[in-house]
Image (cartoon, helix red, strand yellow):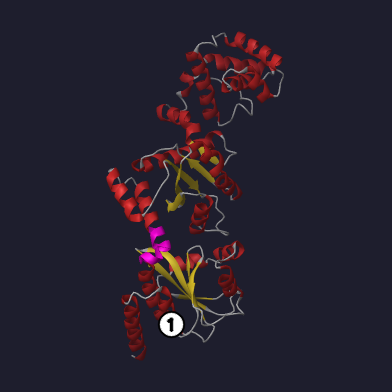
Amino acid sequence: MEDNLVLSRYSLELVKTLSKGSDLQALVDLGYQMLGNPFTITDLSVKLLTSTGETLVTDDPVWNELQIKKNFIFDTYSYYVKESLFAEIEKHVEPFYWLDPYCKYRRIIGRISINNRNVAFLVVCAHNREFIESDKEIVSLLCDAFAIELQKNKYNHLSQGLLHQSFLLDLLDGKFEDKSKIDERMKILGLKLKRKLFVIFLDTQNLDATKSTLPYLREEVELKLANASAVIYNNNVAILASCENEMHFLENESKVLREFISTHNLQAGISRSFTDLTEVREHYLESVEALKLGNLVKKETHFFRYADYLIYDVLNCHADNENYKKFVHRSVLKLIDYDQKNNTDYAQCFHIYLCNFKNIKDAATALNIHRNTMFYRIEKIESILNVDLNDVDILFQLYLSYKILEMTLGSDPMSAGYPYIKF
């Protein structure tokens, strides 16, 4: 009975503090009085948002690290991923006890949710006194109070970020057909994007679950890319990136992201650029398709541009593997057959020649041979093909044939020979 009276009194005090428009620190101070122990509030990537300052905990390594560095170092974060702490936070609706070998004092952990989405968690340290059972109920009250406080405009570094993610999820789901409604939402959110847009699909199936989590990865991705918003979507990460200069973005700005993806053994597909936000869903599907086709043709890479694989997508939409043979020019097959019988590499040589726009010098450089040798090879190839290489339509058919072979064989003719082919 007494505990119920205390909780009722605390609830009333929390309501009064919230209604007065007091700042976050006033709520933290009240929480400290209620609990009699220090506590922290961090976001999902364990970045410190606020903490009580009355009691200095000096003999708990984990607590000290968070207070000094304002976040966990990666090794500490990975340890708690491995120990399933974040899985426990997701699982428990109500606050729960936690203790591990690196924590000197027992903890109570409660999650803070806004619009049914977890955005932060509150951790109490039993430094001043041991916990009693009613402490968990007090933590539950505080989590609700902080959820209300964190939605206020002055704390929009958290709530605004959540709203941005919600908006991006709606765009990815294709919920907007009217551009004016998108513009209205962007004004409300204060969201500004550069002229050129890209959607990047980050496949996280190879993510080491013992070292990282999707929320942590999403946060890291946003740090790597300027003018980008990332969201967890279908158990992967989807990114809406924007820039003014497309070539500069692809060659320079995305370089850090590509290195990050490679280091973590992940893969990503990137859509073509676009300018209309009603097309986000369409270009998300492009990024997914880029990854799928990229793995089919070039399995050794990590970052796939849909623009590089568009022709494969066209082929994929209009024929299955059994019907591709009717699109392959017979002269290319004849050239491959000649290579097999004579131990030559004319098929590879001719492909590089086509990729270099029939430029003898550039093709010779790519093959690391003398240009006279290249001249001789092209003359020999022309005699084997028996086609007019000045005919644009013929050249397109020959180039298309190579693309079909790349797709059906799952190998790159520029780096490896073809197996024996019978159509």
Q: At which x and y percent is residue 27?
A: 40, 77
Above or below 213: residue 70: below
Farthest residue toward the bottom? 2
Q: For residue 333, what is the image quadrant?
A: top right
Q: Secondary structure at mark 1?
A: helix
The magenta-colored residue range is 151-162
Residue under the point 59% across and 74% down: 64
Quarter in which the N terminus is drawn? bottom left
Left of 83 or right of it: where is 1? left
Q: Is residue 114 located in the magenta-colored stretch of the structure?
A: no
Q: What residue is shown with label 1?
A: 135
Residue under the point 65% across and 11% down: 380
Residue under the point 48% across and 58% down: 215
Chief SS of the magenta region = helix
Closest to the observer: 344 or 379? 379
Q: At which x and y percent is residue 182?
A: 31, 47
Q: Is residue 382 visible?
A: yes
Closest to the observer: 415 or 275? 275
Above or below 19: residue 327: above
Above or below 158: residue 369: above
Q: Is residue 133 visible?
A: no
Q: At which x and y percent is residue 336?
A: 60, 18
Closest to the observer: 112 or 412? 112
